[in-house]
Image (cartoon, rainbow, N blue to C red):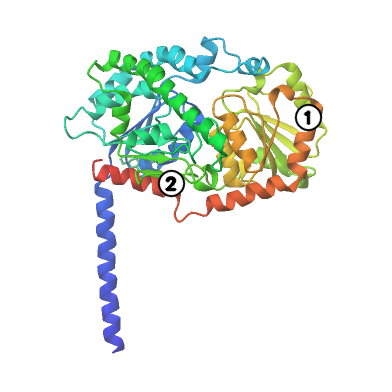
Amino acid sequence: MGKIANESTSKTGVVLILLILGLGFEIESVEGRNILAVEFFGSKSHVITYLPLLEELARKGDKVTLLSPTKGLSKHPNITEIFTFGSDEIWSDNNIDLFAMRERNEEINPWTMLTQVVPKYCREVYDRADVKALYATDFDLILIQPLFNDCALGLVHKIMSKNGKSKTPLVLFSPTSAPNFLVEKLGGNHPSSFVSNTFINLGDDMTFSERFLNFGMNVLFDGLYSFYYLPVMEELYREKVGSDAPGAGEILGRASMILSNGHFSVSRPKPNLPDVVDVGGIHSRKAKPLPKDLEDFISSGNSDAGFILFSLGTYLRSDLMSPEKRAIFLNVFSRLKQKVIWKYETDDIPNLPKNVLLSKWLPQQDLLGHGKIRLFMTHCGGGGTEEAIFHGVPLLGMPFFGDQPLNAQAAEKHGYLVRLDWNDLTEESLTNAINEAINNPKYRENVQRLSTVFRDQIDNPLDRGVFWLEYVMRHKG
Ligand SMILES: *[C@@H]1O[C@H](CO)[C@@H](O)[C@H](O)[C@H]1NC(C)=O
């Protein structure tokens, strides 16, 4: 009896091994696909949200070409980056000083920026030889970051429709929870009654007048988007790839699906169709050990007080802020018992307090995930705000432009951010804000509760994203 059982177990074993080998073989055999990721215009914090997807596919042996507005993000040998144009180039060409604008209470008018400034740079991308060479390549998948990248749709169309009827599959990656104006392109709809317009962030429990305002915002936004912004983009790409190229809505509508960098714990539940898959948390990962100099700095002296991470991101260069503002930071930092690690673009400033360390490059996630971090002082970019949720770190938010004020507002609603307006920055207001965020335990408790829910997922958002991209490639759309 026992013997028979053993034999059948070993037979099952052999069958299992054969199955696993067979599966392995099948997985091997689909490798080496050609993938194109497209983002003409955007920020580093967008690219870092989908880069882990591309790196995972590259690791499996796929060849990835990334048209990107950020230089040198990936060192992976199977990823070829083609730099489009950086926003810092746009700021400097057009004499835009983000700190000074904020101090004069001026906003960047996004519509003017998108229809009058950006097109020039987009045209230049189309004219480049390395970009034109892409038309001759056969791709198995195109992934595009679609938010305000409509000028890139001519290129997407040309590559998609190259092989006649068998169109190259297209997937949209939304670096924030996919907004209504995007899901609409794939047949979805977010009702004005309970899903807030992305640009006003009213939450999902609106009063009657808020719903009315929300409806108005949706109508106003759709109007500007469809009748003012998109026609400029369509004219631009038709000039470059031919007047027969379809409208932006039609090209986006050909996408098989949207990967949406949202999660209901953070971006509220939304009525989406099955072709919108949430991958919120996709780029967040556990902290790795810090480089020795940073670890030594953190663990020196009174290490129990912990440390503060201060970064204004890529576009707001800390070395370009006014000397008055810099002095406020340095004076306040010098009186703290915490250490401060400041992302700063030059090597040294005179009379730097002993408890402050400057660095051009910082492993942000490894610092946010460090046991001794007490506070993250940030401009509230999308990537950094999500990483702070993942690692459960309270924020002191100083938002500037774009989606930053909205991210700050959402974090404030969740109760883990103390806001400090750049124009209200004084030694007193900064000291109070830091003390409140560190010493009042509610901020830390709120973000840690959110972090637990955000991380409690049935599977890993990166695996989920990779699965769906491979699914779309397997079934060609
Ligand atoms: C790059 O792709 C090849 C197959 O094309 C694969 O064998 C190799 O492991 C990949 N490289 C890395 C560093 O993952």
Closer to the camera in the image, 239 or 36? 239
User: Between 219 and 364, which is closer to the camera in this rendering?
Assistant: 219
Residue drawn at x 29%, y 28% is 251
Choose between 1 and 174: the one closer to the eye: 174
Above-or-below relation of 238 to 145: above
Residue 420 lies in quadrant:
top right
Mark sitting on residue 51: none
Vertical placement of 396 versus 344: above or below?
below
Secondary structure, mark 1, is helix
107 in relation to 450, above or below: above
The residue depicted at 28 percent of the width and 55 percent of the height is: 24
Q: Quadrant of residue 360?
A: top right
Instruction: Tell me what residue is drawn at x 31 percent, y 45 percent.
Output: 470
Q: Residue furthest left?
A: 165
Nearer to us in this view, 137 or 389: 389
- What is the CA distance from the residue labelled 2 to the residue labelled 1? 40 Å
Residue depicted at 16% across the width and 32% down the height: 165
17 over 235 or under it: above or below: below
- On the image, the x and y values in percent for residue 147 come to 43, 29
What is the crowding at mark 1: few (fewer than 14 residues within 10 Å), some, or many (at least 20)? Answer: some
**Residue type marked 1:** Ser
Which residue carries the number 2 mark? 462
Residue at the farthest front position? 208
**Residue picked out by circle 1:** 429
Counting residues from the N terminus, which is met first, the one under dot 2 or under dot 1?
A: 1
Q: Is mark 1 within 8 Å of ligand 1?
A: no
- Quadrant observed for ligand 1 in the rendered image: top left
Amino acid type of the residue tagged 2 in the rendering: Leu
